[in-house]
């Protein structure tokens, strides 16, 4: 497969481990216009995936020579979706690092697993199960309609406007000074999203996009439990 498609801005990506996480990432990348090389050691799985992805091969991803034979050393980005087989996950990341892959994303099931992946060469470690569990927990409270937390304790949330801000401008309500969060934008029912300014007026049914330290965002969103 072609391994350099810079003219379109869609660089090819190697996705290793085609379980639920890996196949979902591969499908999304392909939909976005990227060429994807899918790799898994399960021959039966590879055969099933052959109709879904253009380039799918069966190989031992812990074998650096096998990856090089597939041309993975020509990729600048790779995603390791192996989760439960910790040893295979770690050895795969190590092999990719040895091949000179510039940007390696890897899935981890535990913090310890993630720490090891970082040490052997992963640039980005994701914890999909943990992240989804935290996100659902926040949504279940009913104070948020979306929630994203980053590794450094920073979060972004979509929440209803608190009662104290209704019928006031953001400058008048001084939410940032009171609660330590920044209102990034406002979504009004039936209207387009708009970036927030000090003079932006807040109405009762507006949704706010807020950012800040995770704890402060959580506290702010708890204010929105008005009927």
Image (cartoon, helix red, strand yellow):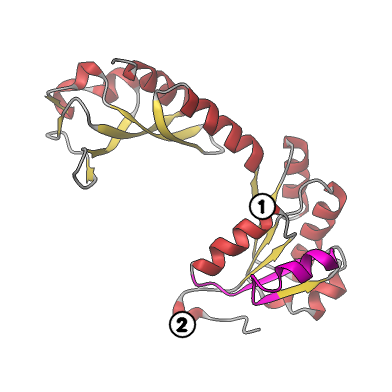
Q: How far apart are the two marked residues, 1 and 2, measured between alpha carbons?
A: 29 Å
Question: Relative to 127, is 163 on the left or the right?
Answer: left
The residue sitting at 39% across, 23% down in the picture is 143
Provide the secondary structure element on which disc 2 rests: helix
The residue sitting at 44% across, 28% down in the picture is 213
Q: Quadrant of the N terminus?
A: bottom right
Q: Quadrant of the C terminus?
A: top left
Provide the secondary structure element on which disc 1 rests: helix
Pointer 1 and pointer 2: residues touching (CB < 8 Å)? no
Question: Relative to 51, is 183 on the left or the right?
Answer: left
Task: In this rendered view, identify the residue nearer to me: 166 or 19.
Answer: 19
Q: Which residues are magenta?
A: 33-55
Q: Which residue is mark 1?
A: 21
The residue sitting at 51% across, 67% down in the picture is 31
Task: In this rendered view, identify the residue nearer to me: 84 or 108.
Answer: 84
Q: Position of residue 116 (x, y in %)?
A: 78, 45
Q: Which mark is residue 7?
A: 2
Q: Quarter of the image holding residue 98?
A: bottom right
User: Which of the two discs, 1 and 2, sits closer to the camera?
Assistant: 1
How would you rate the neighbour count of disc 2 (Cα within 10 Å): few for under 14, some for 14-19, many for 20 or more? few
Q: Position of residue 71 (x, y in %)?
A: 74, 79
Q: Report the number of numbered marks.
A: 2
How would you rate the neighbour count of disc 1 (Cα within 10 Å): few for under 14, some for 14-19, many for 20 or more? some
Q: Position of residue 38 (x, y in %)?
A: 70, 69
Residue 123 lies, with reference to residue 127, above or below; the image says: below
Mark nearer the N terminus (1 vs 2): 2
Residue 184 lies, with reference to residue 75, above or below; the image says: above
Task: In this rendered view, identify the residue nearer to me: 115 or 192.
Answer: 192
Q: Position of residue 51 (x, y in %)?
A: 67, 73
Question: Relative to 10, is 204 on the left or the right?
Answer: left
Is residue 6 inside the magenta stretch?
Answer: no
Residue 94 lies, with reference to residue 144, above or below; the image says: below
């Amino acid at each position: 497969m072609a391994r350099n498609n810079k003219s379109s801005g869609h660089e090819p990506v190697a996705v290793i481990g085609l379980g639920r996480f890996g196949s979902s990432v591969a499908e999304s990348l392909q939909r976005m216009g990227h060429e994807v090389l899918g790799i898994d050691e399960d021959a039966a799985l590879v055969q099933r995936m052959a109709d879904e992805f253009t380039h799918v091969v069966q190989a031992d991803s812990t074998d650096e020579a096998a990856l090089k034979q597939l041309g993975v050393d020509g990729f600048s980005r790779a995603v390791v979706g192996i989760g439960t087989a910790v040893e295979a996950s770690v050895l795969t990341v190590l092999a990719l690092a040895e091949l000179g892959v510039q940007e390696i994303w890897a899935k981890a099931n535990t913090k310890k697993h993630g720490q090891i992946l970082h040490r052997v060469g992963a640039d980005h470690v994701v914890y999909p199960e943990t992240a989804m569990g935290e996100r659902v927990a926040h949504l279940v409270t009913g104070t948020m309609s979306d929630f994203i937390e980053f590794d450094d304790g920073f979060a972004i949330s979509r929440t209803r406007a608190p009662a104290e801000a209704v019928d006031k401008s953001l400058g008048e309500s001084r939410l940032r000074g009171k609660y330590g969060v920044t209102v990034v934008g406002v979504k009004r029912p039936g209207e387009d999203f708009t970036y927030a300014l000090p003079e932006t007026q807040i109405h009762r049914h507006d949704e706010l996009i807020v950012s800040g330290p995770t704890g402060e965002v959580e506290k702010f969103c708890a204010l929105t439990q008005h009927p």
